[in-house]
Amino acid sequence: MPGGERGPASLESREAERGYPAPVIDITPDPIALQLGPLGIGWYGLGYVLGVAVLVLVTQREAARRGIDPRHVTGVLVLSAVLAIIGARLYHVIDQWHIYSNDLLAIVLPPYSGLGLYGGVAGAALGIILYFRPRAIPVWRALDAVIPGTFFAQGIARWGNFFNQELYGPPTDAPWGIAIDCAHRIVDRYPCERFPEATTGFHPLFFYESALTITGGFVAMWLGRRFAHRLRDGDVASFWAIWYGAVRSFLETFREGYNWTVAGGIPTAQLIGVGLIIFGIVTILWRHRNQPHDEPAGDPGPADEVKPATG
């Protein structure tokens, strides 16, 4: 559980002595969904494909609501997807540099089993900026359009962690504890000698994040409709920074032994999350600094007009 003493002799001993009921979700899935000769198609990759499909469908509707030609969504897709994969891969490689430093080819050769969400988001955002800025479409407005779908895509893709048996927390006696087989354990934290497979369930952090980010998507859509007359371009994007930053910062308190940390043992993702929260709050306050309470966010200008796709 989050909080409390984290010393190896204290927490692990108490957890082992306490004992846990058998995990309710007693499934240790195969990460490979389909084997085509030497090529294995993983559930993680399929989750990303499904997430992108939902992202595109939702974003097309959100773009149309904001006066952006929905065809731009497919126009920016390839650029953002490529940069997202590059960013996600770089984040993971930096995190696990102790592994890749001895095998540099593994960075670019399959299987691509490691991706970092923050890196992917940064890459996708860069793609959106590079695509929309030359087309005279407000970048913040474009980012607002993509946020609800981004939330949903994040929530869907997180289920890939379930099939990979990763992104789990400490042992729990909660009725939703999941099984993690010995091969996927953090050996120095939860060895099977102390925490037998048959009697130990773990916090499903992937599910917590999935549920909270999907909820964030619905909240973002509601805010965009309920307060459309008061929101400024970029407010929904700032909401993503606050919501996801808070979710990730909280969930990082559950993770031990396999999260990227900096000096003092602070999880890097937690620091980024706190930075996102501050960024989101500051940008919202800045945009609304001179807006009276009874004044709408602004009348649509020429940039709101539907623009044909040019690429």
Image (cartoon, rainbow, N blue to C red):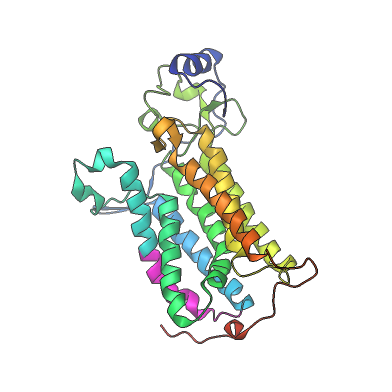
Question: How would you classify the magenta stretch by its main secondary structure?
Answer: helix
For the view shown, which residue lies furthest in the right direction? 294
Quarter occupied by the C terminus: bottom left
User: Which stretch appears magenta?
Assistant: 67-82
For the image shown, how many numbered marks are present on the structure? 0
User: What residue sits 53% from the left and 34% below the top?
Assistant: 253
User: What residue sits 70% from the left and 62% below the top?
Assistant: 223
Q: Is residue 279 left or right of residue 264?
A: right
Quarter of image, res 301: bottom right
Q: Give the answer, above or below, for where 46 lies relative to 167.
A: below
Q: Give the answer, above or below, for where 229 lies relative to 94.
A: below
User: What residue sits 49% from the left and 74% below the top?
Assistant: 73
For the view shown, which residue lies furthest in the front direction? 290
Instruction: Please say whether residue 34 is visible from this viewpoint.
Output: no
Q: Nearer the viewer, residue 137 or 202?
A: 137
User: What residue sits 59% from the left and 60% below the top?
Assistant: 283
Q: Position of residue 12 (x, y in %)?
A: 47, 18
Assess whether residue 205 is covered by the magenta stretch: no
Q: Position of residue 272 (x, y in %)?
A: 48, 46
Q: Give the answer, above or below, for where 222 lies relative to 93.
A: below
Quarter occupied by the N terminus: top right
Q: Position of residue 207 (x, y in %)?
A: 55, 43
Instruction: Please say whether residue 225 is visible from this viewpoint.
Output: yes
Q: Give the answer, above or below, for where 43 lies relative to 208.
A: below
Q: Position of residue 251 (x, y in %)?
A: 54, 39
Assess whether residue 68 is covered by the magenta stretch: yes
